[in-house]
Image (tube, helix red, strand yellow):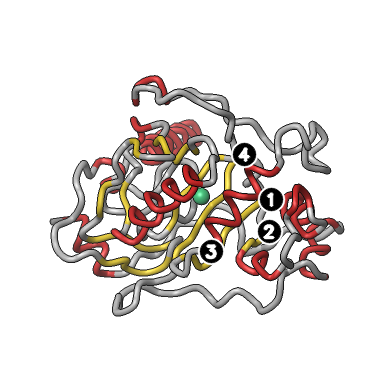
Amino acid sequence: MIKSYRWLAAAALMLAGTAAQASPWSDASSPAPGPAEAIGKPAAGCLAGAATLPLEGPGFQVIRTSRNRYYGLPENVAFIEALGEKARVASIPDFYVGDMSLPRGGPMPTGHDSHQTGLDVDIWFNLDAKPTLPAWAREDVPLPSMLTANAKAIDPKLFGSRQVALLRLAASFPTVDRIFVNPVIKRALCQGVAGAAVGGRSWLHKIRPWPGHDEHFHVRLNCPAGDATCVAQAPVPPGDGCDATLDWWFKPHQPNPAAGPHVPILPAACRWLIAH
Ligand SMILES: [Zn+2]
């Protein structure tokens, strides 16, 4: 009896492992029809009427295209394309675009809790000059951390004026709500690394500290005006964020009990959207 329960437990684990690899969301190969709508929250939602980001354009190249995560709200595609244009004008080499959302958004089997509603995009900090590679050659490109080996400081050989300029450009878009970077990077920006404080630090308002995010930054757009199904996050607190809320990340603290793996409860509209 005990043996068979063990076997059942093992089988359940294997099934759980299989479930993590594929889901109706990662199996969906095309956007859901209809007008573009973010439905729910970035960590529990989905996406109707997604726009597709071209796999390359002036100033950017999409990487890891085999993941099929280059979909988003039209505002997100427009943001990335406009950022690419502005980066070109500023003589910043091409940036790599990582995950946006799956064709219908929803939970991803690997990599993220958010990115579910078409409002999110990961942009990599590697701003070395690079040739335009064919998409198949962009599965495995150098994506170095910007931090020193002990992760206590930025590596000034890697993180410099190009990265600051691209973050500054991204933050300047009114459609951008917030940008997540590693707390060490936020602290370096507060300290004025590579001209980050020239003209003042008010632009750092949107730059939010979050673990990870030392190889890439994560841009989240505002819910578009009139998108009634899009659930906005609490607004970014006022100020540049170069304060005790940033210092908190560098003190010993308990892990947030709300963090960690969780199964999101999706809005009913998402269950309908993925079934049709
Ligand atoms: Zn991200």
From the viewer's perspective, is the residue at label 2 or at label 3 nearer? 3
Closest to the observer, 59 or 135? 59
Closest to the observer, 27 or 49? 49
In space, the residues marked 2 and 3 are separated at their CA atoms by: 18 Å
Question: Which badge, 2 or 3, comes first in the chain's sequence?
Answer: 3
Q: Residues within 10 Å of mark 2 (few under 14, many from 20)?
A: many
Which residue has dot 1 on it? 182
Q: Residue at x 74, y 60 (%)?
A: 198
Which residue has dot 2 on it? 209
Q: Residue furthest top?
A: 137
Look at label 1 and name its amino acid: Asn
Which residue has dot 4 on it? 215
Percent x, y for residue 46?
A: 32, 60
Look at label 2 and name its amino acid: Pro
Question: Which badge, 1 or 4, comes first in the chain's sequence?
Answer: 1
Q: Is residue 227 above or below residue 141?
A: below
In space, the residues marked 1 and 4 are separated at their CA atoms by: 9 Å
Percent x, y for residue 31?
A: 20, 51
